[in-house]
Image (cartoon, coloured by chain):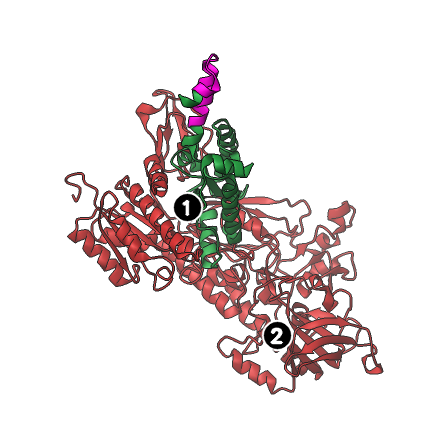
Chain colours: A red, B green
Amino acid sequence: MSERNGSVRIGVYVCHCGFNIASVIDVEAVAQASLALPGVVVARDYKYMCSEPGQTLIENDIREHRLNRIVVAACSPLLHEETFRSAAARAGINRFRVQMVNVREHGAWVHEDSAAATEKANDLVRAAVARVHFHKELDPKRVPINSNVLVVGAGIAGIHAAITVANSGKRVYLVEREPTIGGNMAKYDKTFPTLDCAACILTPKMNAVRSHPNITMWTYSEVAEVEGYVGNYKVKVRRKPRYIKEDLCVGCLHCVDACVFKDPRFPDDFNMGMDKRKPIYLPFAQATPKVVVIDPEACIQLKTGKCKQACAAACERGGVSFDMTEEIKEIEVGSIIVATGFAPFDATQAPEYGYGVYPNVYTTMEIERLVNASGPTGGHVVMRDGTTPKSIGVIYCVGSRDERHNRWCSRVCCMTALKLSHLLKEHTNAEVYNFYIDMRAAGKGYEEFYQRILNERVHFIRGKVAEVCDWALDPSEEGKLVIRVEDTLTGFVRRVPVDMVVLAIGLEPRADAQEVRRIMNMSCSTEGFFLEKHPKLAPAPTYTDGVFIAGCCQGPKDIPDTVMQSGYAAAEAMALADIGYFEIEPNTASVIEEDCSGCRSCVDLCAYHAITFNEVKRKAEINPVLCKGCGVCVASCPSGSIRQDLFEDEEIFGEIEGILARV
Amino acid sequence: MQDQANTETGATPSWEPRIVAFFCNWCTYTAADLAGVSRMRYAPNVRVIRVMCTGRVDPQFVLDAFAKGADGVLIGGCHPGDCHYIEGNYKALRRVEFLRRVLDDLGIEPERLRLEWISASEGDRVRVAVNGLTETVRALGPLDLRARHTKADLEVHVGVEPHMNLEVAAHA
């Protein structure tokens, strides 16, 4: 309509982004310079182009100047392309006739030289103007959304997300690697700052998962393969053999009693290796499902085939099955919520604190079990040497805020350490010394909790501990662990002899985070946690549409934040499922039939088998449903007879020419 | 050697390398955004063209960039095995290997073309890659393809007509 005379009418909009862009780049000059470019009818700069008035400015110009193409020089298109496309669409231009120029992330934020940055912005605007000439009117592609949701990981994040989605009536597949759901939270004794018992608030949710009609819970299982795209993921789940028929087991534990190993002798992972279990075991009393599992590394029958199989004989329901094999389940889901959690920092990586060398050095994860009534000592704080500590040193920031290990603050360790100080004091009445760098108690009720602990006759020494050693300088240090620290508030070096040392270990990405990232086609941020689409405005979506992240796999966070994020991820998944379709970029490739020579070189190049050869026409054909829009075939066609919407050859050549047109 | 190249191609002190970059949407473009968010500083010589995948980078784009005046071309994609489109980056790798030979034949130093694997988390690698290629190209001097081809034409001319001596050819 606006192109009656076939004329290209471009509006160029340069954003100041407050001072973000304007403090480095001469935005006025960039706008002015663009007026000389072919097709540019109007050019403006404005304080905040993405704001309501900024968008209105563009919309009014479109109507007034009969613009049919828009170039916006602002932030990254990954951030605001949608904003400006929508503004253009509201004013009657096809949304795909908008091109963004990234002068913030790729300009003002990375360059100090104002003249050079402005010149760069000019070049890039010239490129965008040249490109946008060739932009066609396109329709967004709609794909249907399967309403099923896959949740990977069943810690508190996965559990909460699964229940939320299931409550909306959608089918949820909850996949957990361990034999039970519950994750790390199930191991905690109490939760800060309220000191309510973790099991008391978690186990009802675990039961809700188990009994929910819309949740299919697969424990001892892993996601093996994910194929497809938003709304239409095909997922293969590998169900590891637990050698117990899940539907027959009632959790009576007769098999465990009957096991030929009369005494438990294998390290119990749930109790951080501080207790022993048998080859056939239930991870913990409230394990969900309450189904035992056989450890193939420990079981005599599975290792040698020469056991009298007392467990099988003890099960009156015939639930033990030694010939169980791995099973692959194939499911179809519309979206995926990844909630795979964190790994606690490996304290042996900080050898100066003596973990693994001195038996009485513990991590906070171990103390959680040690103070727990269902823990290895029944809640009695008894050290590995059998004694109860009379003095305890708690060292903060182990593995966190440390250039040698992890630079980030793990966010929960200060509060965890405070909580455990309180619990240890309560259990043992020992002298408790806290060695901290900074006390980070940001959260509802957290500072108040800190103040409460301060008044509980617990000692606080501000300083990063240099080392823990057993080298006594005087008789009072004999047989003790000596904590050497610079007390930065008083300004001298202290030696604090204690019986027990507790290391407040930080949170890390899991060791297999990279593998999960590949399976899910996600990205990781620098430190290895999964990358969110936007750190503030989209902290649960990822760059892969239909894949969401929740909990500590995205970064360290406490339980309330984890629950909030998983609720948000669930809401995003539900929104997708409810609307029933998703609009994807119309960037698919197509064959220009009259030019195709029928050489077939493209056919094998397509990773998605979207290209077939029509034997009758002797031409290649691209199935737009299967095409993902990578453009590999376009770049490889010898006769130039494949084109790609949004990434046409002319558009990219236009950009190249625009960039280099400066004399 | 470099000095000689600079004199031959007439590099002036004010000359700045011009680099065209093709970054894939999923990894390297995102990494460049991260470099921005992290306020890393790098040479302002690069101009990024966003493509969905490095597999979309037609060898002609690279040749066209050199022909139109680029002194260097940087292609940035996902690490091997990480391609958002499964294997587009391998296609890019093959094309770059092929292009390097073509560039050599055309009298363009193959080092002017660089392929880097930079994941979305590696903002600093964007800085290193851009600065690295900028410095490489700065050391090589301006490409100035026209001057090089004129020179090459003259050499060919000499070859075809063996009776002409160099001096005559130079004046021709």
Query: Residue at point 36% right, 50% down?
Result: A119
Please name whichever residue, A392 or A435, is drawn nearer the observer in this view of the structure.
Answer: A435
Picture coordinates of residue A374, whole percent (x, y): 66, 71
Left or right of residue B100, residue A37 in this image? left
Query: Can residue A535 be seen?
Result: yes
Residue pointed to by mark 2:
A437
The main secondary structure of the magenta stretch is helix
Query: Is A614 rendered above or below residue A7?
Result: above
Left or right of residue A464, residue A96 in this image? left
Mark 2 Cα within 10 Å, few/some/many (few <14, many 20+)?
A: some
Callout 1 amino acid? Val
Picture coordinates of residue A201, whole percent (x, y): 54, 71
Magenta segment: B150-168
Left or right of residue A429, residue A117 in this image? left
Quadrant housing the N terminus of chain A:
top left
Report if residue B120 lies within the magenta region: no
Task: For mark 1, name the chain.
Answer: B
Task: For mark 2, name the chain.
Answer: A
What kind of element bears circle 1?
strand
Query: Is A271 rendered above or below residue B137?
Result: below
Quadrant assignment, res A597? top left
Query: Can residue A602 be seen?
Result: no
**Residue B48 marker:** 1
Mark 1 Cα within 10 Å, few/some/many (few <14, many 20+)?
A: many
Quadrant assignment, res B79? top right
Q: Nearer the viewer, mark 2 or mark 1?
A: 1
Query: Residue at point 48% right, 66% down?
Result: A563
Callout 2 amino acid? Ile
Please name whichever residue, A15 or A95, is drawn nearer the observer in this view of the structure.
Answer: A15
Left or right of residue A445, residue A96 in this image? left
Residue reaching furthest to the top = B163
